[in-house]
Image (cartoon, rainbow, N blue to C red):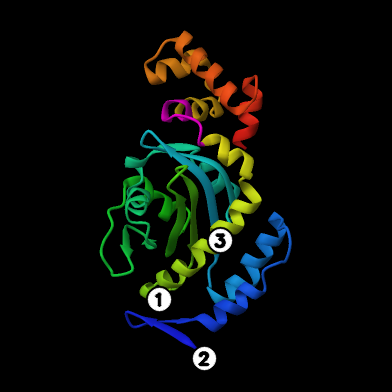
Amino acid sequence: MRTYNADCIDLDLAAWSRVLRELPTGPMSEADFRAWLEGPLRRFFPFERFFCAYGSIAGGRLYMQSMLTSGFSAEFIASRDRSFDLNERGCMKWWLSHRRSLIMDKAEAMDAAGRPIAMTEREIDDVGRFSLGPLAKHGVVDPFSNTGTHMGFTGVPKDRRGQTLAVLELIAPVVHALYFQIKAAARSSVEWTALTDRQSDLIHLAAQGLSDKEIGLRLGISHNTVGNHFSAIYAKLGISKRSQLIALMK
């Protein structure tokens, strides 16, 4: 077995290469992605359930545009906030600052070196409510567009934390690329980069079903200003109405 040793952690690169060779050739569908996750990847990196979300960051908030899960209940999926302040998620805020894998279990979270990461009450409640631990998390962010993916694998070995998180460092870029291929159209990702932070805030509030008046109250601006912002957004995205905007978000 050929391995790579980093900080006394052995990674079986030969086995990882075999997993990569089992990727479908040609355009990948969501069904192909799930089959690879639940077959070759799970044999290499044992886990119970998986989720991956694609979204953007603007004005100190994270906005989720799409999500794919394997093994999670409808209750878990429905409980995921479409947007939230980063201060409400200590582990997410830490991850965005460090861009390193981490592991959560009950009321504790740690990085690969065993250093603690502060969890919020919401995160602690989620881990207990949905039996998430041990949950290994990582992802990839595009610094130019402030978009990216964040993924989690539940039921990973807790007694091999360092190795689990080192393996996740290998896996994350590949999962990101595959998920981006099937969930984030290249045309839409380029268009979102033309928006200002304020415009991004507006469209994500619109995606929650808020009216212009409600958006204005939320952001402390007038109804007319909201309308002017949306006119500018439509012009940038090449659309003409709210329903087209919402469709682009999905």
Sequence-wise, the earlier of marks 3 and 1 is 1
Q: Amino acid at mark 1?
A: Gln
Q: For this view, does 50 lie left or right of residue 138?
A: right
Please give the range of residues in magenta. Answer: 193-200
The one of 36 and 13 positioned closer to us in this rendering: 13
Which residue in the structure is indicated by mark 1? 163
Q: Does 115 appear above or below 210?
A: below
- Residues at circles 3 and 2 in contact by the CB criterion of under 8 Å: no
- Observer-side mark, 3 or 1, equals 3
Which residue in the structure is indicated by mark 2? 1
The one of 225 and 33 positioned closer to us in this rendering: 225
Q: For this view, does 208 lie left or right of residue 11?
A: right
- Residues at circles 3 and 1 in contact by the CB criterion of under 8 Å: no
- Where is residue 121? Give x, y as percent: 32, 46
Which residue in the structure is indicated by mark 3? 175
- Where is residue 126? Give x, y as percent: 42, 50
Q: Secondary structure at mark 2?
A: loop
Sequence-wise, the earlier of marks 1 and 2 is 2
The magenta stretch spans residue 15: no
Q: Between marks 1 and 2, how big is the CA–CA gap?
A: 16 Å
Q: Between marks 3 and 2, how big is the CA–CA gap?
A: 24 Å
Residue found at x 42% / y 26%:
198
- Where is residue 167? Give x, y as percent: 46, 72
Q: Quadrant of the C terminus?
A: top right
Q: Amino acid at mark 3?
A: Val
Q: Does 165 appear above or below 27?
A: below
Q: Between marks 3 and 1, how big is the CA–CA gap?
A: 18 Å
Q: Residues within 10 Å of mark 1 (few under 14, many from 20)?
A: some
Q: Does 131 appear above or below 56?
A: below
Q: Does 234 appear above or below 125?
A: above
Q: Amino acid at mark 2?
A: Met
